[in-house]
Image: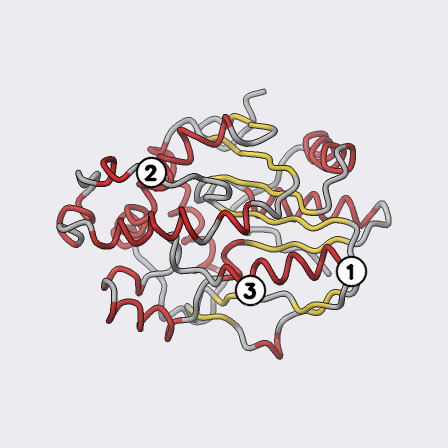
Amino acid sequence: MSPRLHPSMPGFDAALVGRVLDDALAHGSRVHAIAGLQGSGKSTLAAQVAALAQSRGLRVAVLSIDDFYLGRRERQRLARHVHPLLATRGPPGTHEVPLACHTLDALREGAPVRLPRFDKLADTRLPPSRWPTVRGTDLVLLEGWFLKTPAQAADELREPINSVERDEDADGRWRRHCNDALASDYPALWSRLDRMLFLQPPGFESVPRWRWQQEAALQARATRNPHGMDRAGVERFVQLFERVSRQALRCLPGIAEWTLPLDDERRPRS
């Protein structure tokens, strides 16, 4: 299957791409994870690694945690019954984790499996008839913004950290729901990841600009985009990810087998 290169990223240096692939193969990774906050270039790097692996004759499947978002109808149900902010895709609690686990298990076993795909412009998952089918793989690449991020302690949730939490989650119900999901649902998925690279930004402050660059590139190539965001919309959207993103920044350098620091232009610093 052909990898998906993100249009807002020019790509990483070929030597680095080779190092990432060699690292995965040297450690016997069947499921190799690439973690990084929004806009860090993780999908671009995954696509480049997959293309290099394919050039060496390896069979590769590329997945994103985004492919397992709940559809719009499921999120609207959560919004009615749990909290209105759960209508927005992305934070923990808005993914179909059992589907992700099943997909990785089938890929590891070499069974034919359809790979879920999410249409971000339509804001819903594509129908299964449009999912690509893979039959046997040598390497699976999973990229995502909060892979292996642990939950916070309950007392860390008390104070809001931005205006969305202050104004739209005053009682903390939404952030507790996301944190509970992170603690109870996602470890089963994390346990299926053999090895992980973390693309470490200089700080969370880089993320809104990086995410806006992604959005602008996505809109530039879309013929229609009913769910596209303007700059203010992106700024608000990023706040929904801020709490878990900051937790990832604190914890993932001690969890990932390899941490690659990036500068503010997403260039590797070492």
Q: Position of residue 9 (x, y in %)?
A: 54, 44
Number of the label disc, if any, that sits on residue 151: none
Q: Is residue 171 above or below residue 126?
A: above
Residue at left offset 66%, top offset 43%: 32
How packed is label 3: few (under 14 Cα within 10 Å), some, or many (20 or more)?
A: some
Q: CA distance from mark 3 to mark 2?
A: 25 Å
How packed is label 1: few (under 14 Cα within 10 Å), some, or many (20 or more)?
A: some
Amino acid marked by disc 2: Gln
Q: Position of residue 72 (x, y in %)?
A: 38, 71
Q: Quadrant of the C terminus?
A: top right
Q: Position of residue 185 (x, y in %)?
A: 45, 54
Observer-nearest of 8 and 107? 107
Which residue is labeled 3 in the image? 99
Earlier sequence position, callout 3 versus callout 2: 3
Earlier sequence position, callout 1 versus callout 2: 1
Number of the label disc, if any, that sits on residue 110: 1
Observer-nearest of 83 and 121? 83
Earlier sequence position, callout 1 versus callout 3: 3
Label 2: which secondary element: loop
Residue 95 left/right relative to 139: left
Residue 30 left/right relative to 122: right
Confirm or deny contact between disc 3 and disc 2 (CB under 8 A): no
Which residue is labeled 2 in the image? 152
Residue 145 left/right relative to 244: right
Amino acid marked by disc 1: Gly
Confirm or deny contact between disc 1 and disc 2 (CB under 8 A): no
